[in-house]
Amino acid sequence: MIHAGAHQRIVQRALTGILVLGSLLAGYVATTLAKAKASPRVTGQVTDAVTGRRIEKFTVVPVDDFGKQCYAFRPGASECSGGEFTWNFDRNNGGEVVGHRLRVEAEGYRTAMSPALDPNQANVVADFALEPATPTVGRVFGADRKPVPGARVFLATASQPAHFYNEDSRDDEFTLHATTDRFGAFSFPAQFEAYTVIAVHDSGYGEVTQAADSMAGEVILAPWGRIEAHMQYEATAADEAGLRFNSLARALTGSPSISGTPSTSRGPTGSFILSHVPPGRGLLHAMPSKSDARQGVEFIPIEVPAGGQVSHDFGAAARVRGNIGLGEGNIVDVRLEHAHLWLVKKGAVLPPQPGLDPDRFAAADGWRDDWHTSLASWAYFNTLHYFLAQPTDRGAFHIDGVPAGDYTLAIRVFHEREGLPHPRGLPGQPAKTHLVHFTVSEADATERKTIDLGAITVDLVAKPEPPAE
């Protein structure tokens, strides 16, 4: 799990937030956390690759390296001068430091990123010879082909996430962004990897993806989409419920990392309206209670047309409940309240995105543990309709609003990570996945019946041995 506070919020939103972060990144963190007695100190020079002269002004941005994915942490960026820099990585978790890289940006040069830096080494030298390059420029136009001044523009790459929240700019500090001038023009430093430029304006949304050595060119805005959802959960007041939408346009490893949340307003009792929704496919998730994630969250993939509206009803269906118990075995390092309950409806709602082989991730029994071990498998998983919940410390759970269909309930319990803090109660290594298969009939859903799965026993494997020093 990612325990760096602000950065955790970025990744959590990029990958749909809530409890999803714990499952998706558990594998990454397990392989990339390294013991460190002291925070690494990095020094280096930044020079022109052609002339060899020092570059007077540049920006150093720390990058968190999770093995399969890197994320630039722009709030930690530092403006440097004189062609030299010193960097101390002092963000750590209980004596452990995640892998690090450095990203260097300078006007008139192509951005560069260092190789992975050894967190066990106290002093590291990382020199940069930047390639002179023309800045990445482009212009934003409306559907009428007129330039759009004042548009917010974000640049995203595989290692530089983009996070846009429409009129709410609270996360601009985490993102490489610009504002168009009166001619609709914008500019960014040249990139070293493929990038996507996103333009956001009251009149619409647009994006373009280019190779590292290509200009952004023209970005044409399309009208925003709109989502209207009705909450019909019995036990929860509409005021306490919540609704979010996350774009799923790009979710494969190596693709630009982008997340965004449209503005939300509350309509008549039990209804929510999402305006300024980016056109395209995305994941709509409903929370019966924003204050209690244990009541479960429903996720359903949808396609939002440009300038159109999508409507969906939540809650008016069956309730599924049960009680989880632990079988014989070493259970001292397992806490039921940290278990993840994935309730997955069989059958994809949307076809997999281009470039993703559905046969590679199909599951005959309705579940695969490796759905949560890579961004590609996660992209496939998010073509499915599913729920996510947690039990109480005594194993009781319920999930409301389950429509008719065939389901697999995957109960995942975890070994606790000893010696480390547990922000937000995030667990450690998976200990066991237990599957329960059942069906909700049309009558069950229409009459809002309760499907009682009864007592469910999860037999544990032995507690793993601690890694060798």
Image (spheres, rainbow, N blue to C red):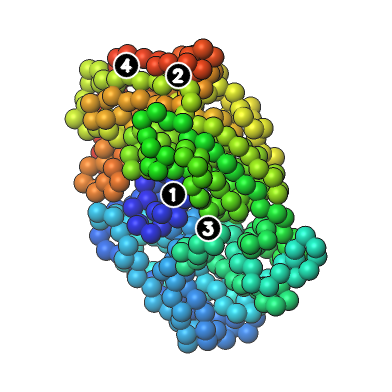
Q: Residue at x 55, y 84 (%)?
A: 55
Left of 101 or right of it: where is 276?
A: right
The amino acid pointed to by label 1 is Gln
Q: Label 1: which residue?
A: 12
Badge 1 element? helix
Give the image location of residue 75, x and y in percent: 43, 68
Q: Residue at x 50, y 50 (%)?
A: 265
Q: Which numbered disc, 1 or 4, marks the residue that appears first in the sequence? A: 1
Give the image location of residue 435, x and y in percent: 41, 19
Vertical placement of 230 versus 174: above or below?
above
Disc number lying in front (2 or 3): 2
Q: Label 3: which residue?
A: 165
Q: Which numbered disc, 4 or 2, marks the residue that appears first in the sequence? A: 2
Disc number lying in front (1 or 3): 3
Badge 2 element? loop
Q: Label 2: which residue?
A: 448
Spatial distance from mark 1 to mark 4, Cα to Cα?
Answer: 30 Å
Marks 4 and 3 in Cβ contact (< 8 Å): no
Q: Label 4: which residue?
A: 456
The amino acid pointed to by label 4 is Ile
In this view, which residue lies farthest toward the left? Answer: 332
The reply to whether residue 11 is in sight is: yes
| Residue 153 vs residue 251, the one in the foreground | 153
Q: Residue at x 35, y 70 (%)?
A: 88
Left of 425 or right of it: where is 218?
A: right
Q: Quadrant of residue 342?
A: top left
